[in-house]
Image: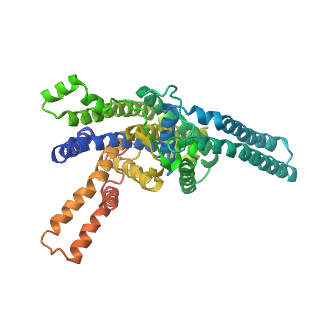
């Protein structure tokens, strides 16, 4: 069997899973899984760019995804004029002081002679700058968070006028990529010189710090109080249900208007996400087959040989780290758009980072098509395995008495089917197809 036929069969099987979900469960559930699968596939492409192209072991994926979600709030939400008037200038001034402190420390490092003078000078600049920064920053934050804390308590976004402009939410997607890319550049400048296992620890720690900041800085993202009511790039279901033309079309096709409105909104989301996925896939495929892509794979396979040929390995690693993180940031902005709210407490680095890595490994590291396949397959399994496992346990225990300890134990175990299935799938793929379902050529 040639590669094209085999790959086509894989995607037909995955499509059958989604279609079967629609017929056996509901089309609403099938489209919901499809939308999150499209976002997961985009995240998998970003991780594959870093690992499959360059061999960078990044387990801080959720930090960049969270930054993408934050960008959606900062762009699409209306501003809070009272909060900005109360403490906005103080916060901006504090940011300038913080940046000036860092720049001053860097300049002092280059200007002062080596030895005790340089060390004392650096310490003095950083300590004084820190206390001045906190003195200005804390007062501004307190003033912002005191303004209408039940509904806002934050600075809001750039949607001046507060209109429900869905296009601003779409604009937030590339902005989320830029925000994640900027954070990745800062992280990469300090962490990319580390060995792969230390790089993994560093990126995981930084992701945890990023999410902790979003949970605690209410002035920026409302913290654990969440930001709700994000503008949508799709019509609202209630508006469709109140449209006589839509109701007439839905009734003519044999659909209930309420069900039809829900499915229509999810289909629009699926179309938008599919366009982004297709665009990124085409660009990454062209990059993979270009001289740049061949250079990245050469660096991945043998850094010493690549350096001997005159390639700047550290600069190329930084470049691909920033690009992959930007893709994860775009996916994070899309996920927040689909949810309609920013929930910092929902970003769990270990849990979801594990899932994205399983997608890349199962699909095929170094192969963009494999990453897309892994994104669809693994997310479908993640959502459907638990209810399927519960049904299986009910079938197995059907003949057991109600008070049986074994029956109770098996039914309780159904809740753990997700992690068991992910581990089993990963082991089977690594045993029988170590390079993934669609391996790199």
Q: How many marks?
A: 0
Viewer-side residue, 109 vs 234: 234
Q: Residue furthest top?
A: 245
Q: Indicate the colouring scheme.
A: rainbow
Q: Where is the N terminus found, in terms of image quarters?
A: top left
**In the depicted structure, whether residue 354 falls above or below residue 36:** below
At horizontal 61% and vertical 49% (from top left) the residue drawn is 191
In this rendering, position of residue 433 left or right of residue 125: left
Viewer-side residue, 69 vs 327: 69
In this rendering, position of residue 22 left or right of residue 322: left
Q: Position of residue 349 (x, y in %)?
A: 47, 53
Viewer-side residue, 357 vs 276: 276
**In the depicted structure, whether residue 37 falls above or below residue 202:** above
Q: Quadrant of residue 267?
A: top left
Note whether residue 51 is visible.
yes
Note whether residue 301 is visible.
no
Q: Where is the C terminus found, in terms of image quarters?
A: top left
Q: Position of residue 76 (x, y in %)?
A: 48, 31
Q: Position of residue 131 (x, y in %)?
A: 76, 48
Q: Position of residue 425 (x, y in %)?
A: 31, 57
At horizontal 49% and vertical 44% (from top left) the residue drawn is 66
Q: Quadrant of residue 404?
A: bottom left
At horizontal 56% and vertical 48% (from top left) the residue drawn is 210
Q: Quadrant of residue 37?
A: top left
């Amino acid at each position: 069997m040639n590669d094209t036929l085999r790959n086509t069969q894989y995607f037909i099987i995955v499509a059958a899973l989604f279609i079967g979900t629609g017929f056996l469960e509901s089309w609403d559930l099938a489209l919901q899984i499809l939308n999150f699968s499209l976002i997961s596939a985009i995240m998998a492409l970003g991780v594959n760019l870093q690992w499959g192209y360059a061999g960078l072991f990044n387990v801080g994926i959720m930090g960049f995804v969270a930054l993408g979600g934050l960008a959606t709030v900062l762009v699409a939400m209306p501003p809070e004029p009272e909060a900005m008037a109360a403490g906005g200038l103080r916060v901006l001034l504090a940011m300038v002081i913080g940046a000036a402190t860092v720049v001053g420390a860097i300049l002092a490092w280059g200007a002062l002679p080596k030895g005790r003078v340089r060390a004392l000078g650096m310490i003095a600049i950083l300590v004084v700058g820190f206390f001045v920064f906190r003195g200005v920053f804390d007062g501004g934050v307190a003033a912002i968070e005191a303004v209408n804390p039940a509904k806002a308590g934050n600075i809001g976004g750039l949607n001046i006028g507060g209109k429900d402009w869905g296009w601003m939410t779409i604009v937030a997607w590339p902005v989320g990529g830029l925000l994640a890319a900027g954070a990745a550049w800062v992280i990469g400048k300090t962490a990319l010189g580390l060995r792969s296992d230390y790089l993994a620890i560093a990126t995981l720690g930084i992701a945890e710090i990023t999410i902790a900041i979003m949970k605690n800085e209410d002035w920026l993202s409302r913290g654990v109080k969440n930001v709700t009511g994000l503008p949508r790039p799709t019509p609202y279901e209630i508006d469709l249900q109140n449209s006589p033309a839509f109701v007439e079309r839905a009734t003519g096709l044999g659909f209930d208007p309420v069900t039809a409105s829900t499915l229509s909104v999810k289909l629009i989301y699926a179309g938008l996400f599919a366009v982004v996925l297709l665009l990124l896939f085409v660009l990454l495929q062209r990059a993979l087959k270009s001289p740049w892509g061949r250079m990245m794979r050469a660096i991945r396979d043998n850094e010493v040989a690549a350096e001997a040929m005159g390639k700047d390995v550290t600069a190329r690693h930084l470049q691909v780290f920033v690009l992959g993180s930007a893709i994860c940031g775009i996916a994070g902005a899309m996920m927040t758009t689909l949810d309609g709210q920013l929930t910092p407490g929902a970003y769990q680095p270990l849990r979801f980072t594990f899932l994205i890595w399983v997608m890349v490994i199962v699909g095929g590291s170094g192969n963009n098509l494999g990453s897309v396949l892994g994104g669809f397959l693994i997310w479908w399994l993640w959502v459907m395995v638990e209810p399927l496992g519960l049904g299986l346990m009910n079938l197995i225990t059907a003949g057991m008495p109600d008070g049986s300890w074994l029956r109770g134990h098996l039914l309780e175990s159904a809740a753990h089917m997700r992690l068991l299935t992910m581990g089993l799938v990963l082991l089977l793929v690594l045993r029988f197809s170590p390079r993934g379902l669609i391996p790199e050529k």
